[in-house]
Amino acid sequence: MTSALAVPILDDDLEARLRARMAEVEDALLHHVESEAPFVTRAARHLMEAGGRRFRPLLVLLAAETGDAGAPGVLTSACVVELTHLASLYHDDVMDEADLRRGAASANARWDNHVAILTGDFLFSKSSELTADLGPEAVRLQARTFTRLVEGQILETLGPQDDQDPLEHYLRVVAGKTGSLIATSARYGAMFADAPTDVVEALTEYGEKVGVAFQLSDDILDIVSETEDSGKTPGTDLREGVPTLPVLIAQRSTDPADARLLELLGSDLTEDAPHAEALALLRVHPAMAEARAYVVSLAAEAKGLLKVLPESTVRTALEAFADAVATRSS
Ligand code: FPP
Ligand code: MG
């Protein structure tokens, strides 16, 4: 049986094809993380089996529909991007000290930081092995993507420099830690399907914008959602002192009515009481609507880039993909 896709695909034939290919990706992923050591296989499959929408491999397959979708390299690169993403989640949960991921215990909570870090390394090396099968251009792209992922994460940890606008800094962080891999997903799909160069370039840029929109939606969800919807602990960014888009917008306010919120946002929110108060104030703040509007405008820019494609079911599906990312509720 094939599972539902993370985004609505209006065309029945395209949907059936994508579902069948995603089922192949799923089987291949389980196989790719097999290790000689049963414990490593178990730890590596832990988050994979906990769920996840597989946005990145789905984008590879969708982008490949602009050319020869069945070409060798499409399926492998779909696995590469999901394994890279999964690897980054194991590391990210250690850095965030997160307990929950995809509704399951994070690897660091279930085992410990050492297991989580090494499992992340294992998954990343598996994705690198697979990338080697795709040839030197893919290896270069994968290396560049990894550099951007890590730089984004480091810039986030460092925070903005004194002379830097915090919002501008944050958007650079997001482009690195999330835009990069989603841009690469779209690029791999179009590139391995042998789509024309202008399509490959436009889809890369589309992926970058959709990726940034994806992360910014995630930031909004971190504030608005309940645990049951997101499979993560809400308010984690706030507790960890990571100022995300809604917080950065709220911090620009000069309205005296925001004095308490601004005071809280400038203080330590690791304790439950101030954390809950800040979360409640943020949830009803106009910064939330402004953040949402920014995400929707990014999705519109991404869709604009699709004009390079003729009107077609794949173009409609890529438009729906951008919309789904911008308005996601989990
Ligand atoms: C989630 O961000 C984290 C990322 C998108 C990237 C993290 C990258 C690294 C840890 C670099 C190491 C990478 C590899 C491949 C080993 P978030 O914490 O804002 O989102 P969340 O709400 O899903 O936790
Ligand atoms: Mg995190």
Image (cartoon, rainbow, N blue to C red):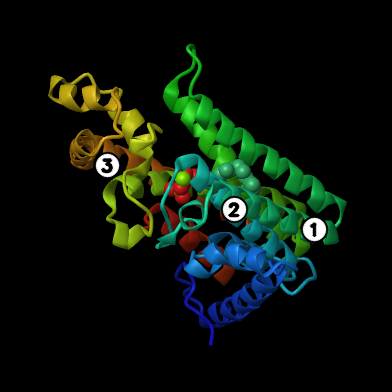
Closest to the observer, 217 or 104:
104
Give the residue pinned by disc 3: 289
Q: Is residue 183 visible?
A: no
Q: Answer with left or right where residue 286 lies relative to residue 1.
A: left
Lower position in the chain sequence, tag 1 or tag 3: 1
Q: Residue furthest bottom?
A: 1
Q: Nearer the viewer, mark 1 or mark 3?
A: 1
Seen at 79% across and 52% down, the residue is 138
Image coordinates of residue 20 in percent, x first then y, are 61, 81
Q: Amino acid at mark 3?
A: Ala
Query: In this rendering, is residue 308 above or below 34?
Result: above
Q: Quadrant of ligand 1?
A: top right
Q: Residues within 10 Å of mark 3 (few under 14, many from 20)?
A: some
Q: Tell me which corner region of the image, top left, top right, bottom left or bottom right, holds residue 2.
A: bottom right
Question: Could you say whether the residue bearing mark 1 is in a helix, strand or loop?
Answer: helix
Lower position in the chain sequence, tag 3 or tag 2: 2
Q: Tell me which corner region of the image, top left, top right, bottom left or bottom right, holds residue 119.
A: bottom right
Q: Nearer the viewer, mark 3 or mark 2?
A: 2
Question: Could you say whether the residue bearing mark 2 is in a helix, strand or loop?
Answer: helix
Give the residue pinned by disc 1: 129
| Residue at mark 3 to residue at mark 2: CA–CA distance | 40 Å
Q: Amino acid at mark 1?
A: Glu
| Residue at mark 1 to residue at mark 2: CA–CA distance | 21 Å
Q: Amino acid at mark 2?
A: Val
Give the residue pinned by disc 2: 115
Image coordinates of residue 207 in percent, x first then y, are 59, 50
Image coordinates of residue 226 in percent, x first then y, are 27, 56
